[in-house]
Amino acid sequence: MHSGSTTRFGRLALGVGLSALALAACSKKAEEKSTATAPTTASTAEVAAAAPAAPAPAAAPAADNTDTITGVKYASFTGDAAKGKVAFVTCQTCHSIDAGVNKIGPSLHAVVGRAAGTIAGFNYTPANRNSGITWTPEKLFQYLENPQRVVPGTKMTFAGFSDPQKRADVIAYLKTNS
């Protein structure tokens, strides 16, 4: 009789083994393909020069621009602070709503209406510190959709809330902590 953990370990080992085989097969095919299609008369420098340049990163919206990717507006939503408190759990790993309590990210106490990059003692990225942003509800709504779009170079790795109602709820919750 096998214990549950032995069975799970066996399945895990089988999964890892199959993944390794699949990766090995793919890399072998990629090697064969690159060897067969590698230019024989052009130098490596010529090939690199002929390659198209990587597209430039999109510019951040202006500090006073609050347009979202999807086109929805903050004014179209009524935030629910109680639901926002539940959604804010996602943010609590890095942020506190208590005044003066910085974590990986700065304290979000009284963030609504505050200029970006201004909490004393927090080490902001130059992108955030120099953004010129004031965290109005509308700007927060835009930022929480995709932080890296609004402040390229921010160290905030959160991908954003795609649900506009959830963003409005989080902002309503943040407003209660001002």
Image: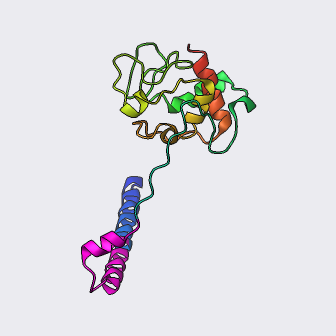
Indicate the position of residue 148 as horizontal and vertical percent values.
Answer: 48, 41
> For this rendering, which residue is in front, 49 or 87?
49
- Please indicate, yes or no, whether residue 49 appears anywhere in the rendered image: yes
Q: In which quadrant is the N terminus drawn?
A: bottom left
Q: Is residue 172 above or below residue 22?
A: above
Question: For residue 65, what is the image quadrant?
Answer: top right
Residue at (55, 38) in percent of width and height: 61
- Please indicate, yes or no, whether residue 1 appears anywhere in the rendered image: no
Indicate the position of residue 14 as horizontal and vertical percent values.
Answer: 38, 67
Indicate the position of residue 169 as horizontal and vertical percent values.
Answer: 65, 28
Indicate the position of residue 25 as horizontal and vertical percent values.
Answer: 36, 77
> For this rendering, which residue is in front, 27 or 154?
154
> For this rendering, which residue is in front, 12 or 58?
58
41 displayed left or right of 175: left
Q: In which quadrant is the C terminus drawn?
A: top right
Q: Is residue 178 magenta?
A: no
Question: For residue 7, what is the image quadrant?
Answer: bottom left
The residues colored magenta run: 23-52
> For this rendering, which residue is in front, 108 or 10?
108
Q: Is residue 39 magenta?
A: yes
116 displayed left or right of 136: left
Residue at (42, 36) in percent of width and height: 154
81 displayed left or right of 160: right
Q: Is residue 100 above or below residue 52?
A: above
Q: Is residue 152 above or below residue 40?
A: above
Question: For residue 16, what is the image quadrant?
Answer: bottom left
Residue at (31, 82) in percent of width and height: 38
Q: Main secondary structure of the magenta part?
A: helix
